[in-house]
Amino acid sequence: MIDIDLTLQKQNFDAAIALTTEVVQKHTGYQPDLLTPDAEFETDLGVDSIVQMDIFVELMERCSLPVNGEQLASVISIRDLTLKALSRLEGRPLPLPQVAELHSKSQPVEQLQELIESTASATLEENPSPLTDTRTMRDFADLPNRDLFHKVGAFHEFYTQKRDAGHYWYGMPLESPCQNRAMIYDEVAGKSRKFLMFASNNYLGLANDPRVLEAIRDAAVRYGATNTGCRLIGGSNVLHLELERKLAQLKGTEDSIVFPSGYSANLGTISALLTNRDIVYTDAINHMSIQDGCKLSGAQRRIYKHSLSSLERTLERSADHDGGRLIVSDGVFSMHGDIVDLPRLLSIAKKYDAKLLIDDAHSTGVLGATGSGTSEHFGLKGQIDLELGTFSKTLAGVGGFVAARADVVEYLRFYANSYVFAATIPAHVAAGLIQSIDLMIKEPERLKTLWRNIDHLKGKLLRAGFNLGDTQSAILPIVIGDDQLTLKFGQAVRHRGMFCQTVVFPGVAVGDARLRISVTSEHTVEDLDQAADILIESARETGVTTDE
């Protein structure tokens, strides 16, 4: 119980709202009249978790309070953030804002007391020991200091501690082709080891097909190592044009455009189409390339919760907006494995006169009768305004693309900066991609084998009691939540010879940590059964709950 006079508490709350508003305004540029106490950071202001962290860090610094990213877990609005600060001050004087206008809403002081008590939290250790350190990577996104590299040193100390404890093993190098089993140099063990590979997005096994490799080799001999230029000035090759025709045919659109990467496809397309007069609506768990494209565009950003009901509420709030609207969503969400409800999403887009961009990075080659992707899966092929994808997964190359109307593609060729001002993919990479598309169409048994493998492993993991979320794709997440437990679980899995991704912030939100398992058509039944056994044994060892 925070035992302070309620009248003084109400005055302190008003001052706290003003201070929070000042900090939010500084980091977002919004005018004070838009920063009401109930303004939600994501759905109303389009402020993502990284900027929220910046705001939170400065507010805690202004209040002389220690910072930990986990404290942001329940913060949705300016009011929530204010109450978080007040609860941690525990009656100590609040620093007065310098310029912000007070935004005191009428609220019974009894309710305010209840809210403050419900958000009260214990003060975390400022210098935690390795055994009690609950910090996550989120805590190092911004550490205010005159020395720009201050956060670098702090993160290095944190990361080294985690790495030496065997919890972080990101970036271990392959010493063989990336197949169902792969040789990897285990930097924790200090030796090369053969692993069961469940961290690859080579969904149809095309990356190692001899015909794909032969096409790459022949084109490299014929056209050289690279084109040394952008597509508009000396960088176009006949194979780029053939690849774009193949992609348009695959997606059922008039034309397509190839970018240097899937990331640059999102950056270039979103920023080319939007201006500061427009609004872009993005799912909170969309890929970071989408989120960065939305930021770069300068458009007003609305981040809706991972729910189409949330999207519709967000669209309704801005129904009178005069500018353009773009809704952007993953087809398959990369860390969760679920598929967007495209029929409903398309209906919502039409209702609010918004254009729709679907990122098919993890859908192309996985969904649909021919592997065309999300639109084919739902019988909506050719009906989506913009279909975006990457070559670095199923199609076994590097680069990205957008398939759309011919006039839209033409516009992007001149206004998407990541296309205009960047060297394109080499011709031999395009040759391999063309061959991969042809093989995917000609050999549908690859897709059938992939889905047989997905169903086999998914069934075993569900029967073992693992939480796989709502996955409906080749991505099988084992949702744990707690970072520390997830890292221990991942460590036990790696120790037993299975290589998969341990995903913490920034891959997912703090408190949503998971193991991410990717199934491919190259996995054998023996691989799948062994993987299930390893996961079950590791869960028992580390205390991850299953039903067995």
Image (cartoon, rainbow, N blue to C red):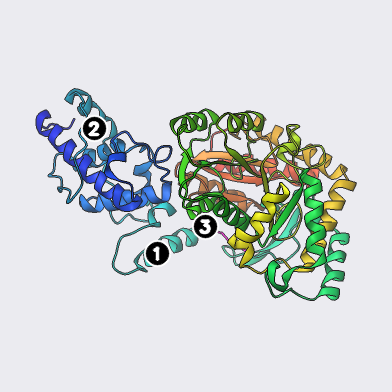
Dot 2: element = helix
Image position, residue 56 (x, y; %)? 31, 48
Query: Tag on residue 101?
Result: none
- Residue assigned mark 1: 157
Total tally of numbered discs in the picture: 3
Image position, residue 426 (x, y; %)? 74, 68
Circle 3 crowding by C-alpha within 10 Å: few under 14, some 14–19, many from 20? some
Circle nearer the N terminus (2, 3): 2
How far is disc 2 from disc 1 in space, using C-alphas? 34 Å
How far is disc 3 from disc 1 in space, using C-alphas? 13 Å
Circle nearer the N terminus (3, 1): 1
Query: Tag on residue 168?
Result: 3
Q: What residue lies at 22% left-to-right and 40% top-to-bottom?
A: 17
Query: Tag on residue 116?
Result: 2
The foreground one among 339 and 173 is 339
Label 2 amino acid? Answer: Ile
Label 3 amino acid? Answer: Tyr
The foreground one among 377 and 293 is 293
The foreground one among 184 and 503 is 503
Q: What residue lies at 49% left-to-right and 45% top-to-bottom?
A: 278
Quarter of the image where the C terminus is located: top right
Segment tinted magenta in the rendering = 168-172
